[in-house]
Image (cartoon, rainbow, N blue to C red):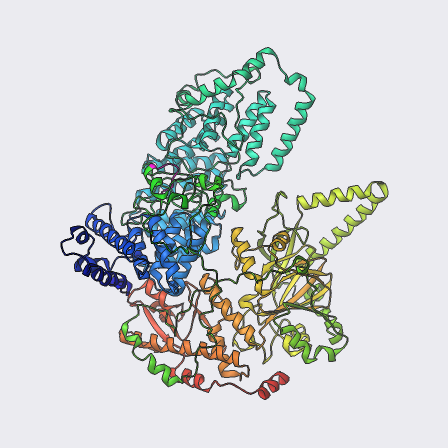
């Protein structure tokens, strides 16, 4: 483990000391005691073994010696722990967790890690522990906790030697959670890393291509797949999978020509895929679907049979066979196929719907109703409303024809014998279906009108009547293919998943699975299997199962506080009384999913069905950190910032000579950031709708009254509405009207968001069936002139609708009931589509001179540029923050929930003529909203979401709600969460400001660190800004001064230490300097801010394009930095001078600064 640059012998040496003490009190002839003693050589060998070796030690091949040593070490540690009577070094538990992890005994590893977590207060400093804990969570499909553990590792040690493995797993998990932007970023970070990994670059590239496909970016996916096929020495399994995906995409999407052409391409790709991997049951299934769509029934049956032979049981395959039989007028054969499908997957919506259709065609509406009900209960059902209407119709038909439905004696006989026929069908189902696959073309079509099918349908509450016999029992190698919405259509997506997440040296890629419909919401992509659309499926020899992403929610995290010493095992009840322990799950291979953490490849999971159905209170104890930790670059008030620059440089003079093994250089490591918990005690229910702080202005003097500034920036006021500001200051708001904007710059670019018109306090899914948090919109671009036409036509259309309503009011006396019915329908959809013109840049002083000059009439604290505005000291433009942006709206236009970038304050003025409705939540509660976003598979920072007010009230979250009228200014205080909807047709202008307060700086830096933790770019470069503040202003607030000084101290030390390390490594530092107004620099790969020392590729430096890397990303690309030059932008003497001259100012100067601004 020398490559990691960290010595891990502490725990082993501690064990040696403890063992010697124990042995001293024992008889020398005790042979049993000697068997629990490690030799010096064994202790030295164990010193290099921890979680970072996971996946890189071949214990199942040539590593028998290592496996024996680990087993012996575990026995020794357990013996010592049992005899120590609770007085055990916590590092022993950590090392015990590592050893069990390497032996893939995850339950024991989790127990040991939990004991270490409970005993070690600063556990977060141990990257190997966090990595091992993340791997265990990943094994148990506890993605929420695995993500947090892996993010902790990258935060405290960005140069962690297994960062590539972490990025790979994060990419997979975010893909499962439908956070595609984060997934792509982590896959790309894994791809550029030259360190060893358990997946090849080709396999990572496949996941990136499949990510495009999952997002329905089919042309991008096609290009990526085809580019991957050009790779030299492409593994056969990867090639087969890529060809399979291309074939399935051509089958479903209009990528080329007419239907005949695209089916021809699809069949060619799938046949090539089968040449590369003849044993792929999934490819045979896809080929059967293609043949079926062009009417080659015999070829389709042969392909389906091959699919069953290769991959054994698949609900999709049996459902497709049923559709084919039904099309051939063979209802009994179709019935058997559908029964096989629902046996294999009781939640297979398509099979239930097709079975219902079959019963309907045979004049059995009651059985059809049961099938349709089962379909609606499936999480994959995409047309619930249509089915509900059909069920209602059939129920009404049954009531009106009850006398007819009582049936003849012959019909009653068929119903009474249905159970026997059903059992016979299921017991011989597989055998009979295989016979029919070859005999179907010779079988005469059965007359549907004369047929009557057995009636024995299981409800969704249980599978009554479905008996698995020896012949019909679903195989343990259960396919992970999800159902399609309707197998009679060709709308299924190929959401490919490749295996090969072997954690050891060799890599394999296995079968691809089909995904959900292209027309289905992205939420459905992973609703059945956590692996679907993201994880790799094992070969035919691997065991597969159904574990679901939401089923993992039943593994609830709690802090382990037990003090007993039995840490050598985790009882099965700790997982669920409805499932076996992880160890027994591996042994039985029942409903298991192959694991990335396993030497057998794939992803293991606890029995998903058991977790979902279990009502037991037992659970896995997952370590949980709930405290709100301090930001890394903000000190506690006890931290001394008195040392001069000379003392700082002297303290770190020789630190860099140890090499470039760790870029995480700070005065003292701080815990990773955490969202705040909900304030305690919770507010009473009658306080959850507080009145909005509002100020009414009558004249200019009121606007410039100093207490107004103090009132707005008071942290106790999350929002302030300044009423009548435009009138008091005589602002010409007409300069921002649509008419004036068109006259000034009619071709100016406008970003357009296409949204659904909904009530302001509700957010429904597109079908109108349930309230959701996700608030999606499609992005496009137009010009001011074109959007102005849309805005005007929308207004005229509204006038026509109003006139029609008035006419209806005169013609209909029951207007009230009609109105209520219409409002009810409006809530539940279908929703009207609207377009919102957003993020219109008004930064160009030449184009918008009159408009920007008019804003100089505002008070200094709300101006775009002022000396007391932190954003005016950044030194370069940040569009939309220290420049003005315009918004053009029609009724219903939504700005989804968010906090401002880096928690800066914001100013928003309504130009009119219509109103806007605002919803505001105080900064203290953003952690609660973050939790809601995570529960709804949303990224708080990057996703688009609209809170459900009922959820917020249940969680005791106060919500300010108010109307912003034309001429009103809304001041959003630092960190306030808010979302806005237009009530009428209006324009708004907005920008950010940064008051010179300790609260603003603290929240800005906290968000800077949280962004870094979440791998999100911070638009405000806080390090760069802090140095500019030290140069430009005097700070009189002791708290603000202390925080800025601490930041300077930390960065000064980091620059000096890194510079020394580079020189010691023989790397020249080239002077580059800075130009005026040069923006701050960010890493082109991970997007963290890079200050002073820029790592630029030699090629980029030669071409003077200066593509910047941070040190960590540069070293991942080129370990010895041979392909990079290091450019220096500041002389250390200049930084030292700024640091020493930055001193606490007087209040008098601060007042003069405020008045002059």
The residue closer to the viewer here, 597 or 524, is: 597
Q: Tell me what residue is drawn at x 42 percent, y 69 percent.
A: 670
- Main SS of the magenta part reads loop
The percent position of residue 491, horizontal first and vertical second, equals 51, 37
In the image, residue 1131 sits, relative to residue 842, either above or below, namely below
Which residue is at the far left? 29
Residue 106 appears in view: no
Residue 1117 at x, y percent in the picture = 33, 62
- Whether 897 is among the magenta residues is no
Considering the image in quadrants, where does the N terminus appear? bottom left
Q: Residue at x 64, y 33 (%)?
A: 389
Q: Quadrant of the C terminus?
A: bottom right
From what the image shows, is residue 941 above or below residue 237? below
Measured as percent of width and height from the top left, residue 58 is found at: 24, 49
Residue closer to the observer: 745 or 653: 653
Q: Is residue 615 shown to the viewer in this render?
A: yes
In the picture, measured across the screen, residue 868 lies left or right of residue 343, that is right
Q: Which residues are magenta?
A: 588-594
Q: Residue at x 78, y 41 (%)?
A: 818
**233 sits left or right of 384 in the view:** left
Q: Nearer the viewer, residue 761 or 567?
A: 567
- Name which quarter of the figure residue 436 lies in: top left
């Amino acid at each position: 483990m020398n490559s990691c640059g960290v010595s891990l012998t502490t725990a082993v040496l501690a064990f040696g000391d403890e063992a010697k003490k124990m042995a001293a009190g024992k008889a020398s002839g005790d042979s049993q005691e000697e068997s629990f003693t490690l030799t010096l050589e064994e202790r030295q060998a164990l010193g290099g073994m921890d979680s970072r070796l996971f996946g890189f030690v071949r214990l199942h091949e040539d590593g028998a010696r290592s496996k024996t040593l680990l087993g012996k070490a575990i026995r020794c540690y357990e013996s010592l722990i049992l005899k120590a009577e609770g007085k055990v070094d916590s590092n022993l538990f950590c090392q015990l967790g590592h050893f069990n992890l390497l032996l893939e005994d995850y339950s024991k590893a989790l127990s040991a890690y939990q004991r270490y977590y409970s005993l070690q207060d600063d556990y977060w400093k141990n990257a190997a522990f966090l990595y091992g804990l993340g791997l265990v969570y990943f094994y148990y499909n506890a993605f929420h906790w695995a993500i947090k553990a892996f993010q902790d590792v990258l935060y405290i040690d960005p140069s962690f030697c297994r960062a590539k493995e972490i990025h790979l797993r994060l990419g997979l998990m975010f893909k499962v959670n439908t956070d595609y932007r984060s997934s792509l970023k982590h896959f790309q970070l894994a791809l550029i890393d030259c360190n060893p990994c358990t997946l090849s670059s080709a396999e990572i590239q496949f996941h990136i291509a499949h990510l495009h496909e999952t997002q329905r970016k089919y042309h991008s996916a096609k290009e990526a797949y085809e580019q991957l096929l050009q790779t030299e020495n492409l593994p056969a399994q990867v090639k087969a999978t890529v060809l399979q995906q291309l074939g399935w995409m051509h089958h479903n999407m209009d990528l080329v020509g007419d239907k005949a052409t695209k089916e021809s391409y699809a069949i060619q790709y799938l046949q090539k895929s089968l040449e590369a991997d003849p044993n792929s049951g999934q490819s045979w299934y896809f080929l059967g679907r293609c043949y079926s769509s062009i009417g080659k029934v015999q070829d389709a049956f042969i392909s389906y049979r091959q699919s069953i032979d290769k991959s054994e049981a698949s609900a999709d395959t049996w459902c497709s066979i049923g559709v084919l039989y039904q099309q051939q007028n063979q209802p009994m054969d179709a019935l058997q196929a559908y029964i096989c499908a629902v046996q294999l997957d009781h939640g297979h919506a398509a099979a239930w719907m097709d079975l219902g259709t079959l019963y309907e065609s045979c004049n059995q509406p009651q059985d059809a109703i049961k099938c349709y009900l089962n379909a609606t209960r499936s999480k994959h059902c995409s047309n619930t409303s249509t089915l509900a209407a059909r069920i209602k119709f059939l129920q009404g038909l049954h009531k009106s024809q009850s006398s007819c439905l009582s049936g003849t004696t012959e019909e009653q006989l068929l119903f009474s014998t249905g159970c026997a026929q059903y059992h016979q069908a299921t017991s011989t189902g597989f055998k009979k279906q295989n016979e029919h696959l070859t005999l179907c073309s010779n079988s005469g079509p059965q007359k549907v009108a004369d047929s009557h099918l057995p009636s024995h349908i299981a409800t969704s509450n249980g599978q009554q009547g479905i008996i698995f016999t020896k012949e019909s029992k679903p195989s343990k190698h259960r396919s992970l293919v999800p159902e399609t919405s309707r197998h009679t259509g060709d709308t299924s997506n190929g959401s490919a998943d490749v295996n090969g997440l072997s954690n050891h040296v060799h890599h394999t890629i296995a079968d691809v699975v089909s995904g959900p419909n292209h027309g289905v919401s992205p939420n459905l992509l992973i609703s059945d299997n956590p692996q679907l659309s993201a994880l790799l499926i094992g070969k035919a020899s691997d065991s597969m199962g159904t574990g679901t992403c939401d089923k993992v929610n039943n593994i609830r995290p709690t802090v382990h506080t037990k003090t007993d010493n039995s840490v050598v095992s985790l009882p099965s009840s700790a997982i669920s009384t409805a499932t076996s322990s992880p160890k027994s799950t591996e042994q039985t291979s029942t409903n298991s999913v192959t694991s990335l953490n396993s030497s057998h490849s794939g992803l293991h999971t606890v029995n998903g069905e058991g977790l979902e159905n279990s009502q037991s209170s037992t659970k896995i104890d997952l370590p949980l950190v709930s405290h709100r930790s301090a930001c890394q670059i903000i000190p506690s008030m006890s931290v001394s910032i008195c040392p001069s620059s000379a003392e700082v440089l002297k303290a770190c003079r020789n630190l860099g000579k140890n090499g470039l093994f760790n870029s995480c250089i700070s005065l003292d490591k701080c815990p990773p950031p955490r969202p705040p918990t909900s304030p305690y005690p919770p507010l009473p229910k009658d306080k959850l709708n507080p009145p909005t702080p509002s100020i009414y202005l009558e004249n200019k003097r009121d606007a410039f009254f100093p207490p107004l500034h103090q009132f707005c920036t008071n942290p106790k006021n999350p929002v302030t509405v300044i009423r009548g500001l435009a009138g008091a200051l005589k602002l010409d708001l007409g300069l921002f009207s649509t008419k004036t904007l068109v006259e000034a710059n009619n071709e100016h670019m406008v970003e357009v968001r296409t949204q659904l018109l909904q009530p302001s306090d509700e957010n429904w899914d597109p079908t109108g069936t349930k309230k959701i948090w996700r608030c999606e919109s499609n992005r496009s671009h137009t010009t001011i002139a074109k959007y102005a036409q849309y805005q005007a036509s929308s207004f005229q259309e509204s006038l026509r609708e109003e006139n029609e309503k008035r006419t209806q009011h005169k013609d209909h006396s029951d207007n009230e009931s009609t109105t209520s019915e219409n409002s009810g329908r409006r809530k539940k959809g279908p929703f009207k589509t609207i377009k919102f013109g957003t993020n219109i840049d008004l930064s160009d002083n030449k184009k918008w001179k009159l408009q920007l000059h008019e804003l100089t009439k505002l008070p200094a604290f709300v101006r775009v540029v002022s000396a007391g505005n932190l954003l005016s000291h950044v030194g370069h433009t940040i569009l939309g923050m220290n420049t003005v942006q315009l918004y053009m709206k029609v009724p219903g236009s939504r700005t989804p929930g968010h906090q401002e970038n880096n928690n800066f304050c914001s100013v928003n003025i309504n130009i009119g003529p219509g109103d806007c409705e605002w919803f505001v939540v105080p900064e203290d509660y953003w952690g609660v909203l973050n939790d809601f976003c995570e529960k709804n598979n949303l990224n708080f920072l990057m996703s688009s979401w609209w809170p459900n007010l009922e959820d917020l009230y249940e969680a005791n979250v106060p919500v300010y709600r108010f109307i912003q009228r034309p001429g009103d200014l809304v001041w959003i205080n630092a960190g306030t969460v808010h979302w806005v909807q237009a009530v009428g047709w209006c324009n708004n202008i907005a920008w950010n400001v940064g008051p010179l307060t300790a609260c603003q700086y603290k929240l800005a830096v906290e968000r800077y660190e949280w962004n870094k933790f979440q791998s999100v770019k911070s638009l405000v470069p806080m390090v760069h800004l802090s140095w500019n503040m030290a140069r430009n202003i005097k700070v009189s607030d002791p708290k603000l001064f202390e925080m800025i000084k601490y930041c300077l101290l930390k960065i000064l030390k980091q620059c000096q230490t890194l510079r020394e390390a580079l020189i010691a490594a023989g790397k020249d530092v080239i002077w580059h300097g800075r130009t005026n107004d040069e923006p701050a620099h960010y890493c082109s790969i991970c997007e963290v801010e890079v200050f002073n020392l820029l790592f630029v590729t030699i090629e980029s430096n030669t071409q003077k394009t200066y593509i910047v890397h941070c040190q960590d990303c540069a070293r991942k690309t080129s370990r010895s930095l041979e392909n990079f030059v290091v450019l220096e932008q500041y002389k250390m003497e200049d930084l030292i001078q700024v640091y020493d001259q930055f001193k606490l100012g007087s209040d008098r100067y601060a007042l003069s600064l405020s008045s002059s601004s």
